[in-house]
Amino acid sequence: MTHKPIHDVIIVGAGASGLMCAINAGHRGLRVLVLEKGPKAGLKILVSGGGRCNFTNVFADPRKQFLSQNPHFCISAMSRYQPADFVEMVEASGIDYHEKKLGQLFCDHSAKDIVAMLLDRCAAAGVDVRLRQEVTAVTPADDGGFRVVTARQTYVAAKVVIASGGLSLPKIATDLAFRTANRLGLNVVSPRAALVPLTWNSSDREKYQALSGISVDAVTACNGVSFRESILFTHRGLSGPAILQISSYWREGDTVIIDLLPDTDAAEWLGTEREAKPRQRIVSMLKTRLPNRLVETMAGDWFQDVKIGSCSPRQLAQLGARLNAWQFRPGGSEGYRTAEVTLGGIDTNEVSSKTFEVKKVPGLYAIGEALDVTGWLGGYNFQWAWASGWCCAQHLDPIPPGRE
């Protein structure tokens, strides 16, 4: 059964970008339908930030914290809709929040507050949000507009916004954006898991898997980029903010350099300790700076546990170099199962950076994670979602005069 075109705009996906677009399109007088695959709206919002939603970052800068084959694409939208704009919405809704670190803003209570705010605003704007409506195809109609096909029925609208996200968290994800792009002849930058834990290679697994649960302040570096935050040892590999961040820059076969003593020239420190306390054993000394279990695992592999005074300057220099530049070669990543976002997506050269309309397919728009724009960990991806959704809505046609 085909519905008459009673909606001006259909938005596919009730995530962050889709709901933001729906709210603003509705307030501009458009009849908006949102179709969501899952049983709830905003599922990725609900699970983000440990359930408290890191909803933006006050330091979000489109020139610094975003990856794309076209690094200039996100500048326009993020300049027009900034973190302060979303914070104003949060404050107007009475949601309590706090800055955790590095400009990251979290809800005091629950991510449910953000979803409730968005849904309340959708209702106020007259937006029709329908759940458990998995879209299987978006196709241009012969007589203009688009047909949006679900298992239950086919909807028709003059305009369609693809806000269906990427491939991360596959239980709630869909590849609709990429399938649609391919069907319409649009270029897609090969998607891959990002902000994702990295796994042990077979040799390192035997050495380090028993260290699961240990966290260390460190600097990770790969392909000319570095991050200073904590790393977390797990049974399967390394995780933690510094690893998740660097994973967006890592590729199969690359080595990640990890500085386990980021504020210390380890070789110099070891040399000073050798002169001051020659009878001290290396294990005892390293335990003053690193977790006990990590040091005990290093012993016999990275160094021999002898009195430091018996070590030559060359031996200490070699150990110091390894502590400041551990060469970790991942076996792989955990993939989309645990990835927070998808790197890659619809090529931004296919889309207007002002309106988000697909250049080759007038009336079709793409926003949020569906596009080849990926932010760092820390609220940046949500800010991109809010900005792209808001900006897209400003350029959807208003109600034609005299419409019935």
Image (cartoon, rainbow, N blue to C red):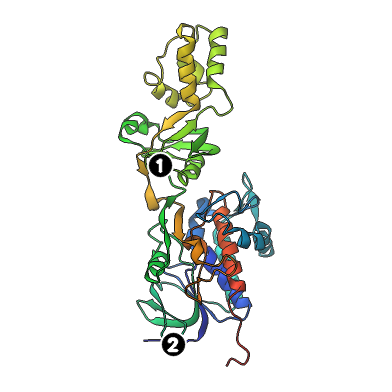
Q: Quadrant of the N terminus?
A: bottom left
Q: Is residue 332 visible?
A: yes
Counting from the top left corner in percent of width and height, residue 308 is at 48, 10
Q: Closer to the camera: disc 1 or disc 2? A: 2
Mark found first going from the N terminus, 1 or 2: 2
1 and 2 marks in contact (CB < 8 Å): no
How far apart are the alpha carbons under marks 1 and 2?
Answer: 49 Å
308 relative to 54 in the view: left or right? left
**Mark 2 = which residue?**
143
Confirm whether residue 119 shows in the render: no
Judging from the image, what secondary structure is the residue with disc 1 in?
strand
Q: Position of residue 305 (x, y in %)?
A: 41, 14
- Nearest the camera: 121 or 187? 187
- Mark 2: give few (<14), some (14-19) or many (20+) Cα within 10 Å: few
Q: Secondary structure at mark 2?
A: loop
Q: Residue at x 57, y 24 (%)?
A: 264
Q: How many marks?
A: 2
Tell me: residue 78, above or below residue 261: below
Q: Identify which amino acid the numbered label 1 is placed on.
A: Leu
Q: Residues within 10 Å of mark 1 (few under 14, many from 20)?
A: many
Residue 326: give x, y in percent of width and height: 45, 28
Classify residue 172 as left or right of residue 391.
left
Residue 64 picture location, percent across and down = 60, 48
On residue 198, the disc is 1
- Which quarter shows the C terminus? bottom right
Q: Which residue is located at x 36 percent, y 42 percent?
A: 332
Closer to the camera in the image, 3 or 116: 3
Amino acid type of the residue tagged 2 in the rendering: Asp
Q: Which mark is residue 66?
A: none
